[in-house]
Image (cartoon, coloured by chain):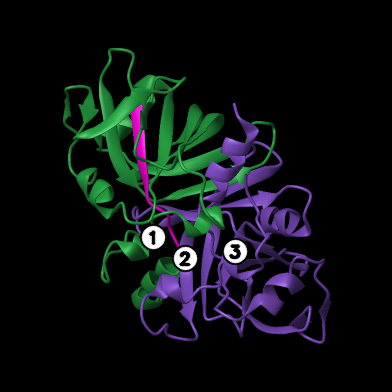
Chain colours: A purple, B green
């Protein structure tokens, strides 16, 4: 396999930017910027989504303990929020690394500044590779800002994070 | 759960457009336009990807029989190819619904007009929902056209297929 062809082909996959959050039963909250996300089924209602989450991250550990997670969709212009959650999360004064939130119905933090969010119950974790595939059933959804035009034109994308920023390949 | 919030939030996920192809041991070939694709791990080398594939499709049946599949990335402007493979595939005169191809190293058809392609060995199928999650290990990759600029700016996207075209939500 030509490594450059592999890298370039895989980097053609377009990605949105999400802050994955979770709250463990002991109250620990975690958050991390992720991009390996796709819906995988319409039914059974509710729909299913997967996220590839780095196994050595706090977000992974907390998601497993919680049995639930939220995907907070970031909006165009929210690069700063994306970069904030590349770093370890600091929970203080009711904020996550300075970002205000409320508890969602699953307990997962719903970021108040994110335009949309889906909360998921973990139905299976496929333990393969350096990131595991967390399969979630969408159990709640929040919209704080109705996108003008297409919803998929309103999300912050990998390509908005910098000319040479990629996560994939 | 507010159904409109759910639909809009899930439709914020940006998708590229791929023609998934496979060739069964009996020589049957199948192809279908898909969009629910993401990488899920960098390692073990090679990387892993998932595709959500409709269980009642020929592409799904053939992928299962083949134990392998190819994701042919479509390029900007290839809307016609995307729409072609929304319909059942016609294999004749060495073409797939009129599109020329060659056999990849896994046997899966590699479309000659697609700018890039990854071939995957199926390592697991997670049987949940109206689409199953086919987990593939990338075993080969082809690049017929080096993207100018970012690779993820060169792929045909869901939003390029029409103002009201969505597959998700």
Above or below, A143 against B142 in this view is: below
Tags 3 and 1 on a common chain: yes
Using the rendered view, name the quadrant where residue B12 is placed: bottom left
Q: Which residue is mark 1?
A: A46
* Residue A54 visible in the current orientation: yes
- Image point (40%, 39%), residue name: B72
- Range of magenta residues: B14-22
Instruction: Tell me the element at label 3.
Output: helix
Q: Nearer the viewer, mark 3 or mark 1?
A: 3
In the rendered image, residue B107, in percent from the top left (x then y), is placed at 39, 19
Instruction: Tell me the element at label 2.
Output: strand
- The tag earlier along the polypeptide, 3 or 2, is 2
Q: Which residue is mark 3?
A: A158
In the rendered image, residue B71, in percent from the top left (x then y), is placed at 42, 38
Residue closest to the far top: B26
Above or below, A8 against A57 in this view is: above
Residue B33 relative to residue A127: left or right: left
Distance between mark 3 and mark 2 Cα atoms: 26 Å
- The tag earlier along the polypeptide, 1 or 2, is 1
Is the C terminus of chain B in the top left, top right, bottom left or bottom right quadrant? bottom left
Instruction: Tell me the element at label 1.
Output: loop
Could you tell me if the residues under marks 1 and 2 are in contact, i.e. CB atoms within 8 Å? Answer: yes
Q: Which residue is mark 2?
A: A139
Above or below, B99 against A146 in this view is: above
Q: Chain of mark 2?
A: A
In the rendered image, residue B87, in percent from the top left (x then y), is placed at 18, 43
């Amino acid at each position: 396999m030509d490594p450059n062809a592999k890298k370039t082909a895989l980097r053609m996959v377009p990605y949105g930017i999400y802050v994955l959050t979770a709250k463990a039963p002991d109250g620990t909250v975690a958050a991390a910027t992720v991009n390996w996300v796709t819906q995988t089924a319409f039914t059974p209602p509710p729909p299913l989504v997967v996220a590839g989450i780095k196994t050595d991250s706090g977000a992974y550990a907390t998601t497993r303990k919680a049995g639930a997670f939220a995907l907070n969709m970031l909006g165009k212009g929210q690069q700063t929020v994306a970069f904030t959650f590349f770093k370890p999360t600091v929970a203080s004064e009711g904020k996550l690394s300075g970002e205000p939130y409320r508890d969602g119905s699953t307990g997962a933090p719903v970021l108040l500044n994110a335009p949309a969010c889906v909360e998921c119950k973990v139905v299976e974790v496929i333990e393969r590779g350096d990131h595991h595939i967390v399969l979630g059933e969408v159990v709640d959804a929040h919209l704080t800002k109705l996108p003008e035009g297409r919803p998929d034109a309103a999300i912050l994308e990998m390509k908005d994070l910098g000319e040479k920023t990629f996560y994939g390949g």
